[in-house]
Image (tube, rainbow, N blue to C red):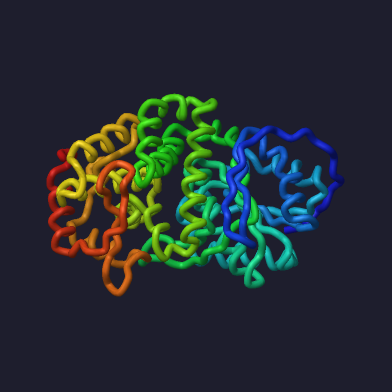
Amino acid sequence: MSLSPSAAAPRETSECRRVAVDLGARSYDILIGRGLLAEAGERLAETLPGARVAIISDETVADLHLEALQEALARAGIAQSAVLLPPGEASKRFEVFETVCDRVLEARLERGDAILALGGGVVGDLAGFVAASVRRGMPSVQMPTTLLAQVDSSVGGKTGINTRHGKNLIGAFHQPALVLADTGLLDTLSRREFRAGYAEVAKYGLLGDAAFFAWLEENHGEVFSGGEAREEAIARSCAAKARVVAEDEFEAGSRALLNLGHTFGHALEAIVAYDGTRLVHGEGVAIGMRLAFTLSARLGLCAPQDAERVARHLAATGLPTHIADVPGQMPPAETFLDIMAQDKKVSRGALTLILARGIGEAYVERGIDRETLHGFFAEELAGGKTG
């Protein structure tokens, strides 16, 4: 992995939306708009002057965008190298993490140099953990190429890898120095990938902004087709996450709300062994959010109409909403509970769930007993797509 600087050249900059993540000395900007990949060198040089860069990406994304990024960095005179991973969730494991760390060290990058993540959530999580670990911490720049990563995983500093015990159980909080969300890169996504990211957009409305969810119900068609509504949805999602992260950076309280649907979804991902042909992360979140609202309704916390509205909207976008929507056999309810018991949000044996008193009214619930959850999963597994 060699480092090769090149001469800088001036370039026009695009208009973009800017969302600030206010964390004192660790504050940073999220820039949102078309054309940001071509400006990556200038933006990075402004934020981290003099830094060399190791680009971490996967082979699929690299085929589409790596050359353009390298050219943009070269125009700004930034020395660079690249480490490419196999695509997919399987890259978030110890062996790949070790390999990437070794490659960064082989390039003799120093503590003030930067790791640049070009890709979706898998790349961003792994690259962020590498940045948090190599030389006990290096700056990172997130350049998310999927909708899911632009509105969720690239923002907030959560990094990590998976283990056989569950998802994201090894990692660190390590805030990026900059997030560049080029919305033009989303044009290369498959319909399925875009839908999976949309689940995270809908989440922000469901957990704390009923007006935003209602706006999505009216405008989701334009969010999918592109244009102003897409950038509006991304900016509002990032702003919502930025507010929560600023209030609770290390997930000691309110930040847990961002896990709406995730505890259920992560269990499903583990059950299918992170097989993306059966289920991808955003699809698991969509099913998980429907489960969270259905459980809330059954417990009398929210109106059944709210749960029905959530299921109806997610299904209208083509997202799965029931466990039965996942191809293949499912294990018994006890298996779901055993996997959820390993979730990183378990505290002193008590599982934390995000439930809701209504749309836009999510809250942290630590008092649901295992017997109640067992009965709920048994009904869901027996009932198919009813309820």
Q: Quadrant of the N terminus?
A: bottom right
Does the image show residue 260? yes
Instruction: Place residue 72 in its image quadrant.
Output: top right
> Which residue is at a point 22% across and 64% down the rendered structure image?
367
Q: 36 left or right of 90?
A: right
Closer to the camera in the image, 138 or 215:
215
Name the outermost residue toward the right: 7
Does the image show residue 339? no
> Which residue is at a point 58% across and 55% down the rendered structure image?
22
**How many numbered marks are there?**
0
The x, y position of residue 194, in whole percent, is 45, 36
Q: 234 left or right of 379?
A: right
> Which residue is at a point 44% across and 41% down the rendered structure image?
197
Closer to the camera in the image, 87 or 56:
56
Q: Quadrant of the C terminus?
A: top left
The x, y position of residue 46, in whole percent, is 76, 50
Above or below for 35 versus 362: above
The x, y position of residue 246, in whole percent, is 51, 56
Closer to the camera in the image, 231 or 153:
231
The x, y position of residue 304, in whole percent, is 17, 40
Q: 38 left or right of 262?
A: right
Name the outermost residue toward the bottom: 348
Above or below for 142 versus 371: above
Q: 71 left or right of 59?
A: right
> Which residue is at a point 42% across and 25% down the rendered structure image?
221
Closer to the camera in the image, 380 or 90:
380
